[in-house]
Image: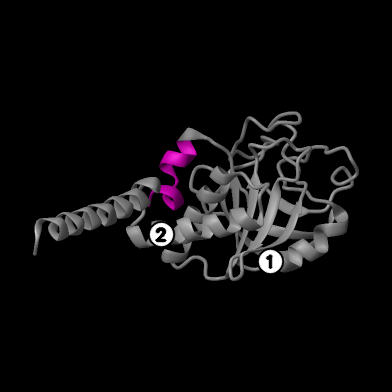
């Protein structure tokens, strides 16, 4: 092997090593294979859905991937609620990960004690009337005082594991979708016209990630660091 060929070979190996390290380093706590999947999905989804917050998307994909590896989730559906956006923005997405298609993008409320237009405070405590961040699993449906509703189970210990006993559910509400976004008692309320199609799409064991750049959650959730 002449000197030129040897130098080219060394450079190629160095570039491959750098690229592998970059993929891993860009997603802490993920194996190279998992990080590669997240990178791939993020790139495709952002191309299809340019108005989504890249950080909220990446965080949600990491959570979905961890949940799947833990045997919790195997349906290719992911709902993202981006509480870093104001309630006046369409900050809920339902994404089909099988073909990276946006199924829904709409408004969603937050709890009355979580903030005004911007949500800034979250809680896992009963009677707090605040929204909870973290990873959720959808459960069964029922008809209640707010019509067709979807029960939710919080999977993030310490952040939303009380939502089921707090009766935090997804439901339609008259104060969502009419130009003015009101407040719930912690429920992710949506436009009544979209309640049935969205609920029927995501019911029964699909993941919801309620994102907010909360340092404690980002660094302690088992779905983000496990």
Q: Quadrant of residue 85?
A: top right
Q: Residue 182 at x, y = what percent?
A: 83, 37
Mark number displayed over residue 189: none
User: With respect to residue 42, does 134 lie above or below?
Assistant: above
Confirm whether residue 29 shows in the render.
no
Local packing at callout 1 (Cα closer than 10 Å; few below 14, some 14-19, many 20+) is some
Judging by the rendered image, the residue that carries numbered circle 1 is 203
Confirm whether residue 39 shows in the render.
yes
Q: Residue 86 at x, y = what percent?
A: 72, 35
Numbered disc 2: secondary structure? helix
- The structure residue drawn at horizontal position 22% and vertical position 57%, both measured from the top left corner, is 13
Q: Using residue 76 as the reference point, say whether residue 193 is left or right of it.
A: right
Viewer-side residue, 193 vs 122: 193
Viewer-side residue, 20 vs 209: 20
Numbered disc 1: secondary structure? loop
Q: Using residue 16 as the reference point, say whether residue 68 is left or right of it.
A: right
- The structure residue drawn at horizontal position 79% and vertical position 37%, both measured from the top left corner, is 88
Q: Which residues are magenta?
A: 216-226
């Amino acid at each position: 092997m002449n000197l030129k060929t040897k130098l080219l070979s060394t450079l190629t190996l160095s570039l491959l090593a750098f690229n592998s390290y970059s993929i891993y380093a860009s997603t802490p706590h993920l194996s190279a294979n998992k990080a590669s999947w997240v990178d791939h999905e993020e790139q495709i989804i952002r191309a299809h859905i340019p108005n989504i917050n890249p950080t909220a998307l990446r965080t949600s994909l990491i959570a979905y991937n961890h949940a799947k590896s833990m045997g919790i989730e195997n349906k290719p559906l992911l709902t993202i609620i981006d509480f870093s956006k104001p309630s006046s923005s369409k900050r809920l997405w339902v994404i089909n990960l099988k073909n990276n298609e946006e199924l829904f993008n709409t408004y969603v409320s937050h709890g009355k004690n979580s903030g005004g237009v911007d949500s800034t405070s979250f809680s896992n405590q009963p009677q707090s009337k605040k929204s909870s961040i973290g990873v959720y699993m959808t459960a069964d449906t029922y008809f209640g005082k707010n019509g067709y509703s979807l029960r939710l189970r919080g999977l993030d210990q310490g952040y939303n594991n009380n939502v089921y006993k707090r009766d935090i559910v997804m439901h339609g509400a008259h104060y969502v979708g009419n130009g003015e976004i009101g407040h719930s008692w912690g429920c992710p309320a949506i436009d009544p016209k979209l309640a049935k199609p969205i609920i029927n799409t995501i019911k029964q064991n699909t993941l919801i990630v309620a994102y907010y750049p909360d340092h404690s959650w980002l660094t302690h959730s088992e779905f983000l660091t496990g």
